[in-house]
Image (tube, rainbow, N blue to C red):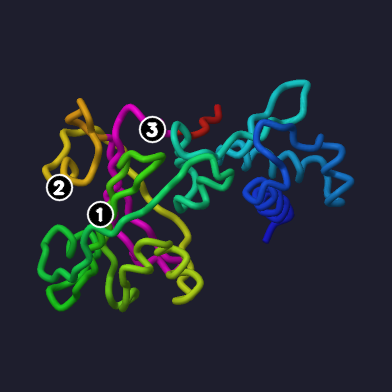
């Protein structure tokens, strides 16, 4: 692994675990040079990667500002995060409820996405997420049962990704995401507190393993007044 990526991962871990707290300043470039023993160019590359991924904001003439990774109003698109990881500050009361869990086979859309045939079957997992007393998220995910042979209620309501990585040893590397807005389906209306809204914000994603295999296809919908999506753009 390159030196700047080592620094990036270490700083990212310190931000995620609140060694460096949000809305405070990161140590200066010179301080980081002394701490890690690498060149200023290496430190700057690591800081640029942190900024691109939404962890810090570089401010001219000052130390970098650590950005908050909250839940409502801060969904960072450059990271694959579970609800508990996004809520590391404990600012929000979050509860995940399993709405349905069953196996499907022969669904053309799902087969096309996974590049599979009719012999393959998939878990379909639907979950609602209660945030500070309101059902603001609804998620439907599909998992290839060749890779994920078992999911139950306990796993679905705690952390599927923790189970996939810690118990099954799967190496999740990246996700391709598409954001759109559309009218809510009847299923979403049933499991979300949409109030006066009849539309939802949608993040449709395909998640990959390190060997290139597709692990998950997911549709995550949000009530539109409660969430924004944040990414960093560099010129």
Rendered residue at 82%/43% (across/down): 32
Tag 3's secondary structure?
Answer: loop
Of 211 and 139, the residue lying toward us: 139
Magenta stretch contains residue 112 = no
Which residue is more in the foreground, 37 or 123?
Answer: 123
Labelled disc at residue 187: 2
Q: Main secondary structure of the magenta part?
A: strand
Q: Kindly identify the residue that appears in the image at 38 percent across and 68 percent down.
A: 155
Membership of 216 in magenta stretch: yes
Marks 2 and 3, the one that precedes in the sequence:
2
Q: Is residue 175 left or right of residue 58?
A: left
Quadrant in the picture for the N terminus: bottom right
Residue 140, numbered circle: 1
Considering the numbered disc 1 on the image, is that residue within a helix, a strand or a loop? strand
**Image height of 54 relative to 114, above or below:** above
The CA span between labels 2 and 3 is 20 Å
Q: In the rendered image, which residue does mark 3 sit on?
A: 227
Q: Position of residue 131 (x, y in %)?
A: 39, 42
Q: Earlier in the sequence, mark 1 or mark 2?
A: 1
Few, some or many C-alpha atoms within 10 Å of disc 2 (few <14, some 14-19, many ≥20)? few
What secondary structure is marked by label 2? helix
For image coordinates 40% across by 64% down, the residue present is 160
Q: Is residue 159 left or right of residue 195?
A: right
User: Where are the magenta residues, as a range?
Assistant: 201-229
């Amino acid at each position: 692994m390159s030196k700047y990526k080592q620094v990036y991962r270490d700083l990212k871990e310190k931000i995620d675990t609140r060694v460096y707290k949000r809305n405070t300043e990161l140590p200066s470039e010179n301080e980081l040079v002394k701490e890690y023993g690498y060149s200023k160019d290496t430190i700057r590359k690591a800081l640029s990667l942190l900024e691109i991924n939404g962890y810090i904001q570089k401010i001219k003439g000052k130390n970098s500002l650590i950005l908050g990774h909250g839940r409502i109003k801060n969904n960072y698109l450059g990271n694959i995060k579970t609800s508990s990881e996004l809520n590391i500050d404990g600012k929000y009361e979050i509860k995940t409820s399993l709405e349905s869990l069953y196996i499907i086979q022969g669904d053309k859309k799902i087969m096309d996405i996974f590049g599979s045939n009719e012999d393959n079957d998939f878990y379909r997992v639907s979950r609602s997420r209660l945030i500070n007393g309101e059902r603001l998220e609804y998620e439907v995910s599909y998992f290839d049962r060749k890779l994920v042979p078992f999911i139950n209620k306990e796993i679905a309501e705690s952390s599927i990704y923790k189970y996939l990585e810690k118990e099954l040893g799967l190496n999740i590397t990246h996700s391709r995401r598409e954001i759109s807005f559309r009218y809510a389906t009847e299923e979403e209306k049933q499991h979300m507190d949409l109030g006066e809204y009849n539309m939802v914000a949608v993040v449709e994603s395909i998640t990959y393993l390190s060997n290139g295999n597709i692990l998950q296809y997911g549709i995550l919908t949000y009530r539109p007044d409660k969430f924004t999506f944040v990414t960093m753009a560099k010129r």
